[in-house]
Image (cartoon, rainbow, N blue to C red):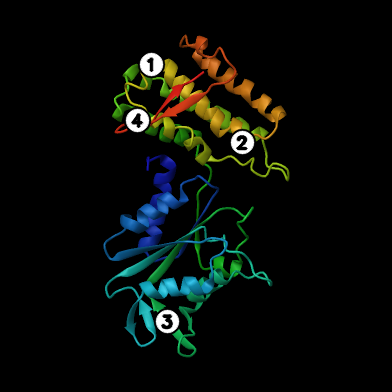
Amino acid sequence: MVPTIDNTRQKYVLQHLLTQKVNVVAVGPTGTGKTVSVSDLVLGGLPDRFLGLTFTFSPQTKAGVLQNSLMSKFDKRRSHVFGAPIGKHFVVFIDDANLPQKERYGAQPPLELLRQLLGHGGFYNFTGGIRWNAIIDTSFVMAMGPPGGSRTQVSNRLMRYLNYVSFPEMSEVSKRTILNTILKGGLSQRGVKSEVIDLSSKLVEGTLSIFRRCCKTFLPTPSHVHYSFNMRDVMRVFPMIFENDGNSLPNEEVLVKQWMHEMQRVFYDRLICARTGNSLFPSLMMNSRSWATRVGTHRWFPRADLYLGISCRKGSDPTAKSVI
């Protein structure tokens, strides 16, 4: 994880709360680093006395499955009392906590089970009779996105037991820092020439510019529900570029053409009609030419479309080459 001012502050607050055994919920839009930040802390960023457990909810998560999964991790401390091993403390991370579907009367059984555990210190066991099981030395940290789509509004009966840590959209400085660090570091490790790597900052600026335009122009509607863009889309532009080495990426022209192809694949191909596509492509070309002209590379865009093929050879990594 690339450290920035934003995620450093958020991880500091999370670490302080978790070491004080406080129940926490991390809330924010998709692609803001909630899962990565919390996972880093729960699975190794806390003192040795803390043991991390992770669960990921889905719309089909059932309360019985969650209860059985939790009980399989707990140690029996004494009669009808369960929890972490002696001298330890469990920190249970639940990702996508607001995904379970609501039942007929509006309740979400997995979340109601957690509400009972947080509010009353345990839950009932129905195996061999109805018995109350107390849970000790355990705290919870959850991550959830804003309501919408398959994500639901969580009842305040549960949320009142949790301390909120907000993960807002990353600042432009943080986005540039993360993308430049990943792109430059990845290309330098693959032995790409320094003059080619120097162009990566221009590619980052162009990617973020098109991303902002897509977020502002192409909004989700009932007929275009998939017009939802976030930082994960930006990150999908670069993986194929990372597969290059010094031989497959000999100069700036090849890098720019591969970037253009990936931008079309991630953003342009999501648009479902010619009218919206024709409004994005000129922006992509204009944005590219605006900085390409400054470095003398405007001749690299003679065509309106680019076609790259993935070539795979035995014993070598796949590479992308222009076929038209």
Q: What residue would you read off at disc 4?
A: 313
Which residue occupies the extreme bottom position in the image?
129
Q: What's the mark number on residue 270?
A: 2
Secondary element type, mark 3 = strand
Q: CA distance from mark 4 to mark 1?
A: 22 Å
| Disc 3/disc 4 C-alpha distance (Å) | 58 Å
First reached walking from the N terminus: tag 2 or tag 1: 1
Kindly check if marks 2 and 1 are in contact, taking CB atoms under 8 A apart as contact: no
The three-letter code of the residue at mark 1 reads: Asn
Residue 91 x %, y %: 38, 65
Residue 125 image point, x, y percent: 47, 83
| Secondary structure of the residue carrying numbered label 1 | loop
Badge number at residue 251: 1
> Crowding at label 2, few (<14), some or many (≥20) Cα neighbours within 10 Å?
some
Left/right of residue 194 with respect to residue 177 in the rendered view: left
CA–CA distance in space, label 3 to label 2: 50 Å
Residue situated in front as seen by the camera: 268 or 99: 268
Q: Which quadrant of the figure contains the N terminus?
A: top left
- Mark 4 and mark 2: span between their CA atoms? 30 Å
Q: Which amino acid lies under the numbered mark 3 shown in the image of this protein?
A: Ala
Q: Is residue 115 visible?
A: no
Q: Separation of disc 1 and disc 3 at Cα?
A: 65 Å
Location of residue 315 with respect to 301 vertically, above or below: below
**Residue at position x 47%, y 26% from top?**
309
The reply to whether the C-beta atoms of the residues labelled 4 and 1 are less than 8 Å apart is: no
Of label 3 and label 2, which has the lower sequence position?
3
| Amino acid, disc 4 | Arg
Looking at the picture, tell me which residue is in the foreground, 196 or 37. Answer: 196
